[in-house]
Image (tube, rainbow, N blue to C red):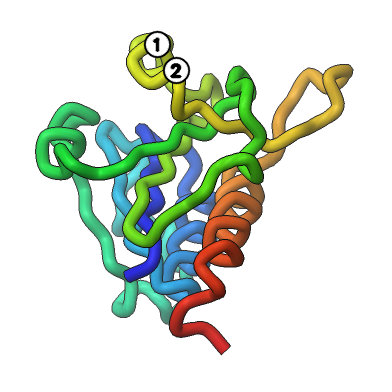
Amino acid sequence: MNLNIVLFQPEIPQNTGNIARTCVLTDCELHLIKPLGFSLDEKQVRRAGLDYWPYLKLQVYESYEELREKYKDGTFYFSTTKGKKNYTDVKFKENDFIVFGRESCGLPDYIREENKENLIRVPMLSTSTRSLNLSNTVAVVAYEALRQLDFPNMK
């Protein structure tokens, strides 16, 4: 395993399916924090992941606290438009966790407040009223982290 991708209460099944596919093809583990805005059995999630679902390393948690309790010693980074550091400023290590928020509202204030030093962002035009699609953001950040790790186990 290279990295851990965490989705905090994802809402759109197609995004989760696309992210799952990215995780399979990059040897990353996907962690989902409930409540989910869909069932993992839904057609849209499966279709976006195509035939990759059997190969996905997937963990599902009842809460953010459950994830943090399980990985007390893990290094966590939090992708948010409110981050001060660019994602390229981080020196990622194998097995790091990168947490992404909900499509509609991002990460809750309490998570950002508890982790101020590890907030990262993908730069975007400040005039925009929106942010990048979640699955695009995950791919951008994950591939930078994997580049820093010299693309382990990848051709």
Which residue in the protein does label 1 denote? 113
Asked if 150 appears above or below 109 in the picture, the reply is below
Number of residues whose C-alpha sits closer than 10 Å to that of mark 2, classed few (under 14), some (14–19) or many (20 or more): some
Q: Nearer the viewer, residue 131 or 79?
A: 79
* Residue 13 sits above or below residue 57 on the image: above
SS at circle 2 = helix
The residue to which callout 2 is attached is 116
Residue drawn at 65 percent across, 50 percent down: 136
Rendered image: mark on residue 32: none
**Which secondary structure lies at badge 1?**
helix
Q: As rendered, which of 2 and 46 lies closer to the eye?
A: 2
Q: Residue at x 39, y 41 (%)?
A: 7
User: Residue 109 location in percent, x, y?
Assistant: 42, 10
Which residue is at 78% across, 18% downward?
129
In the image, residue 49 sits, relative to residue 73, either above or below, namely: below
Q: Distance between the residues labelled 1 and 2?
A: 6 Å
Residue 39 x %, y %: 31, 48
Q: Which residue is painted at 33% across and 62% down in the image?
A: 29
Whether label 1 touches label 2, CB < 8 Å:
yes
Position of residue 9 measured from the top left corner of the image (x, y, whole percent)? 36, 33
Q: How crowded is mark 1: few (under 14 residues within 10 Å), some or many (20 or more)?
A: few
Image quadrant in which you'd find residue 114: top left
- The type of residue carrying mark 1 is Glu
Residue furthest to the bottom in view is: 155
Q: Is residue 67 left or right of residue 93?
A: left
